[in-house]
Image (tube, rainbow, N blue to C red):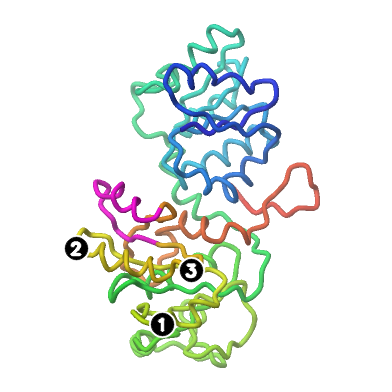
Amino acid sequence: MILYLTSNDHVNLLDMIEQEQNLPVKKLTGQFSLLSFVVKDMRHFSHVRFVAIDRKAILESDDEMVQALLSFQTMYEIRLIVIAIGLPESSSFLLQLTEAGITNIATADEIDPLRAEIRECFSEQGLQRFISPVSTVPDIMKKDSSTYEEQQYRFDCKNINIAIAGSDRRVGVTTTAMNLMCWINHHGGSACYLEANMSKHLAHIVQLFQPEQDGQAYVIEGHDLYFTNELNRDYNFIVIDCGVLSEKILPKTFINADIRVLCGSAMPYELPVFYRAIQRCKEIEVHPLALCVPKNIRPYVESMNNNLIFGGNSHDLFDDKINASVYLQLLSKYIIVFDPQDTHTFQITHFY
């Protein structure tokens, strides 16, 4: 399937692809803030194979559009096609796109050459015209993971409860909760960790790190960790470690949370346990997070639940980098996004 963000002038450009390659095209017509779309709306279209973007439909400047596309590439593994009719080869915008690894760019200003370029963009190999035979990984993409992780956001919320539970023991619940708290605290928000299970993991963490106590919080590397819900202050988010989901009754802390994340391992012999846990949560909205799933079995795992999110396995309690795109996706509804037409809206992203 193709998702096509298009202006009214170019709405029919991909009709030939739909007819020739039997690829359905979902057209969204109008004017778009691309960054806002990536952060808030793209999760509804994560199943598509291609995203085509008409430059004329984007509200941001060329520089801002490139930065939004970098965020897009970090969050999704989808082929991006940019339609920039009449863009000269000397354009700095074209150079920025190719340096970012975006090379499926249709630039011709006459209809027949334009159609030929678009066809090649949707071919198996993609458009080869802007691919350098010397360079393998563009420099800008080598920097992308670190610069993406350095972005700062403004969160418009207070004391939003994020409950994280596991389908079984040792699936990464505590580490995921800690990592999420660290990611929020390092990217412009405020968050704390609250233990709400009988695992006593926090007691072992406190014993190991010997942190200072500030009121009810134990403070490690600037992060507030709590044994009880008697918090020192308000936060944007309270990340609650719910432990393993009960086979009988779901804990109230999990049911009553604003965001619910169900962690599970998805090796073939672990799938039945994860699947049963997902089924126990079918009456409430849950984000199933499958950790460390081999790529060759991901299609099978996805058939269990089309809202499944894949994440990496972390071995560092205070790692704010791993699964950054997952956390951004989970919290997107609480992020204030810059609107180029609204001078009073706060711009959330500080790009390099």
Name the residue that disc number 2 marks: 269
Look at the numbered discs 1 and 3 and tell me whether their residues touch, using CB distance below 8 Å. no
Residue kind at label 3, given as amino acid type: Glu
Label 3 SS: loop
Q: CA distance from mark 3 to mark 2?
A: 26 Å
Q: CA distance from mark 2 to mark 1?
A: 24 Å
Q: Earlier in the sequence, mark 1 or mark 3?
A: 1
Identify the disc placed on residue 283: 3
Residue kind at label 1, given as amino acid type: Ile
Residue kind at label 2, given as amino acid type: Tyr
Dot in front, 3 or 2: 3
Bounds of the magenta span? 289-305
Residue at x-position 59% and y-position 25%:
92
Residue at x-position 65% and y-position 61%:
154
Which percent across, then down, holds residue 139?
Answer: 43, 36
Dot in front, 2 or 1: 1
Q: Nearer the viewer, residue 205 or 330?
A: 330
Badge 1: residue crowd in 10 Å (few <14, some 14–19, many ≥20)? few
The stretch drawn in magenta includes residue 238: no
Badge 2: residue crowd in 10 Å (few <14, some 14–19, many ≥20)? few
Name the residue that disc number 1 marks: 249
Which percent across, then down, holds residue 72?
Answer: 51, 42
Residue 56 vertical position relative to residue 265 in the rendered view, above or below? above
Identify the disc placed on residue 140: none
Q: Nearer the viewer, residue 34 or 185?
A: 34
